[in-house]
Image: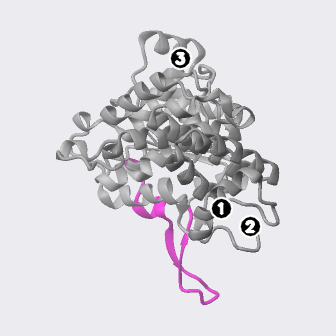
Amino acid sequence: MNTTVTVIDACGMAKVPALLLSRPGKGKSSLIRGLAASQAIPCEVVLGSQYEPAEIGGLPYLDPNGNGVQREAPAWAKRLVEAGTGMVFLDELTTVPESVQGPMLTVVLDRLVGDLKLPDQVRVVAGANPPDHAAGGYDLAAPMANRFCHISYEPTVDDWLHGMSTRWRTLPISRAVVASTERTSATVSAVMGFIHHRPDLLDKFPESPEERGRAYPSERSWDMLARALAYVRADDQPAILTLAVGLVGEGAGMEFVQWLQHSDLPDPEAVTVDPSLVDWAHERPDRLWAVLNGVVTLAAERGTTEAFRKAWKPLGAASDAGVQDFAAAAARTLATFRPANAKIPAEMRKFETLLKSAGLLSEDAA
């Protein structure tokens, strides 16, 4: 349960929609209520089977001020807006009629309830039964399924005993962390490095109908994975694996985690300070790509003139070591993040011809 709590927490902070999957009666609602209570934020549980479409998507009414038909948000949404924070759990997502599923998906994906926009601090989690326990339900279409992190929830006997003893008021402490610029750059570079290594896994639409309601790799889901990974520790392998499998599917997710473990990528900040940490001339291509893009991402995240200047050192070192193609690709990206009025670093001049031809460096600036 600890990993489940951590992953839901990380998804919430990363603004990645989470879909909690378990058989009926496993305590999904209790888990979400407990997580909200542990963070001292309000929680609203919306059971799809107990609501009409208008009670989720908003009740239509004619605006007296002549603004046409508006949608009055339900009370639970107004309470969350008034609180400015909280958690909403939309359960039974795949076992309700499509007329109800549509408004529920709008809440999850667009954060809209009627004409009301939920605050950014409100975390939205959906709940559903696995396909083999959703008789008579409506499975998610592949494009919708691809927008979620699919999290399987199977509490153990010990989890249940602990919940009973505390009346479900306490949960294991989340291991999720606040994303730093360093961690964000590392996770982005890791995902980019893996895709450079396995470009065929960037977008792999599921072939069989039963797989289309589950997680699969796409440009969107890899981006969500890079964002969500920034909110878990680099050594938290259970959470990393759960996020990867939950967002890009079991095959691609497990391969990514194995690649990540064997790559042992250096910290982008450490490489920025000391480029000699990397053996540029003999490094594997996928690692080169990941390291250089990690350096660029770190500079972009920080957005300062100093970060921009320092980021050129590793690029220059890579170019000097004979891997100009990799360095040039990173240089084109880094040049687009040049702060206003930032001077041209000496290392950047090594790419002067390239950047001029790409329109990223003017004659005056050079």
Determine which quarter of the picture holds residue 336. bottom right
Instruction: Inspect the image, locate mark 3, and give the three-letter code of the amino acid beneath it.
Output: Gly
Q: Nearer the viewer, mark 2 or mark 3?
A: 2
- The residue segment tinted magenta is 49-73
- Residue on which the image places disc 3: 163
Is 62 one of the magenta-colored residues?
yes
The disc at residue 352 is 1
Q: Are marks 1 and 2 in contact (CB under 8 Å)?
A: yes
Viewer-nearest residue: 70 or 256: 256
Q: Spatial distance from mark 1 to mark 2, Cα to Cα? A: 7 Å
Q: Spatial distance from mark 3 to mark 1, Cα to Cα? A: 63 Å
Q: Position of residue 145 (x, y in %)?
A: 35, 48
Q: Residue at x 34, y 37 (%)?
A: 249
- Residue on which the image places disc 2: 366
* Disc with the residue nearer the chain's start (2 vs 3): 3
Mark 2: which secondary structure? loop
